[in-house]
Image (tube, helix red, strand yellow):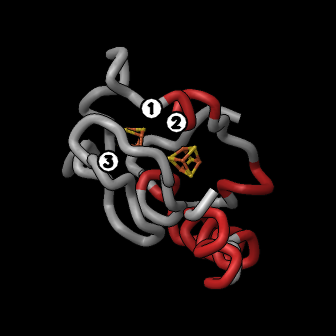
Amino acid sequence: MDCRTGCGACCIAPAIVMPYHGMPAGKPAGVRCVHLQVDYACAIFDTPLRPAVCADFLAEPAICGNNAQEAMQILTQLEASSAPAPGLRESCSND
Ligand code: SF4
Ligand code: SF4
């Protein structure tokens, strides 16, 4: 499917764990990316500053739902179910 204009759910709901331009600590889940504009377009879409993880994320009905609200709900649930337990997160950071 084509990405839905004016959605932006995948720029808010998921965490981006790696540091990237404008967000040196990465992006926590549920936090709006600093590059998401008021019209929900990405300000760095066509630049090398856009994280690879964003470019790799492709719109698909199972993730994006039928509207932005559904996409937010689905992505928030996926994020919660895939987040490592606090203990695991600590042990990973000590690697
Ligand atoms: S959640 Fe899907 S439709 Fe919405 S902005 Fe992301 S890729 Fe596009
Ligand atoms: S860099 Fe662009 S595509 Fe990636 S999360 Fe931010 S606004 Fe979305």
Q: In which quarter of the image is residue 63?
A: bottom right
Q: What element carries label 2?
A: helix
As measured in the structure, the alpha-carbon distance from the residue carrying label 1 to the one carrying label 2 is: 5 Å
Q: In this view, does 13 lie to the left or right of 36?
A: right
Judged left or right of residue 10, residue 6 is left
Residue 58: x and y, percent?
66, 35
Residue hosting label 1: 51
Distance from mark 1 CB to nearest ligand 2 atom below 8 Å: yes
Circle 2 packing at 10 Å, graded few (<14), some (14-19), many (20+), is few
Give the class, few, some or many, for how many residues have Cα within 10 Å of label 1's Cα (few <14, many ≥20): some
The residue tagged 2 is 54
The answer to which image quadrant residue 76 occupies is: bottom right
Q: Is residue 16 above or below residue 56?
A: below
Inspect the image, locate mark 1, and give the three-letter code of the amino acid beneath it: Pro
Count up the numbered dots. Answer: 3
Ligand 2 sits in which quadrant? top left
1 and 2 marks in contact (CB < 8 Å): yes
Q: Any mark on residue 40, and which?
A: 3
Label 3 amino acid?
Tyr
In the image, is residue 59 above or below residue 82? above
Image quadrant in which the C terminus is located: bottom right
Label 2 CB less than 8 angstroms from ligand 2? yes
Question: Secondary structure beneath disc 3?
Answer: loop
